[in-house]
Amino acid sequence: MADPKVRTAYEVLEVRDNASHTVIDAAFRALASRYHPDRNPSAAAERRMVELNRAYALVRTSDLRAVYDRLHPPVNPDPNIAQPTPAPARAAAQKDVLDFGRYEGLSLADIARHDPDYLRWLGRHSSGIRYRQRIDELLKNPQPPPASERMGGRRKDR
């Protein structure tokens, strides 16, 4: 049985085990800046920084990560913990499907119909760089929501 005190590299870096390389790098940089000795001189921060460096060293490249994943398969110790659900097959085939955040698994077109303000924000944010062209297209040519989702309309008098 595994020691419950030992955390995986992904847990230390506070990312999912299926996170992209970009997400892992960003998580490491954000946590490292928070716990770096120049910013936080406490002993706890120093221990955390050592832990972060060790974890990142295990998964920093695709080759190292492949070896780590073979030696440490993902474990779900508590069956009550929900696993992330994969995006629908229809959405996975599209290039404009978000793979992060609160709208993970939804297409940009769906988000444009329901929350165009989020798309405006995403178009300005660094995490939306790869979607920027499609976001601009959707915001320039907004699509009305499907008839089944429209509010209002004509009321029948009784």
Image: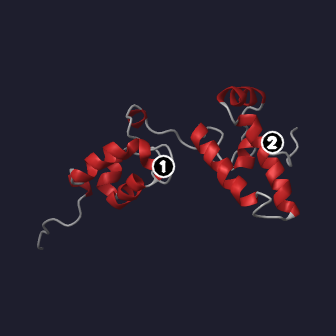
User: Which residue is tagged 2?
Assistant: 54
For image coordinates 57% across by 44% down, the residue present is 84
Instruction: Please name the amino acid that badge 1 sits on.
Output: Ser
Residue name at image x 40 percent, y 58 percent = 121
Image quadrant containing the C terminus? bottom left
Q: Looking at the image, which is closer to me, 48 or 14? A: 48
Residue 8, percent across and down?
77, 42
Residue 8 visible from this viewpoint? no
Identify the residue shown where x is 80% and y is 45%: 7
The image shows residue 155 at horizontal and vertical percentages of 14, 69
Query: Residue 97's image quarter?
Result: top left
Element assignment for label 1: helix
Query: Within 10 Å of the Cα at label 2, are there few (<14), some (14-19), or many (20+) other Cα atoms?
Result: few
Q: Of all residues shown, which one is farthest toward the front?
A: 38
Q: Residue 133: image x %, image y %?
A: 32, 43
Is any part of residue 61 visible from this angle? yes
Quadrant location of residue 45?
bottom right
Asked which secondary structure carries label 2, the reply is helix
Q: Is residue 35 shown left or right of residue 26?
A: right
Instruction: Say if mark 1 contacts mark 2, CB within 8 Å.
Output: no
Left or right of 78? Residue 44 is right
Task: List the single residue furthest toward the bottom.
Answer: 158
Q: Mark 1 points at which residue?
A: 127
Q: What residue is drawn where x is 35% and y is 57%?
A: 120
**Image height of 71 relative to 112, above or below:** above
The residue lying toward the viewer, choosing from 129 and 148, is 129
Image: 47 above or below 60: below
The relative height of residue 132 versus residue 30 in the rendered view (above or below) is above
Left or right? Give the position of 88 relative to 2. left
Q: In this view, does 133 lie above or below 69?
A: below
How far is disc 1 from disc 2 in space, using C-alphas? Answer: 26 Å
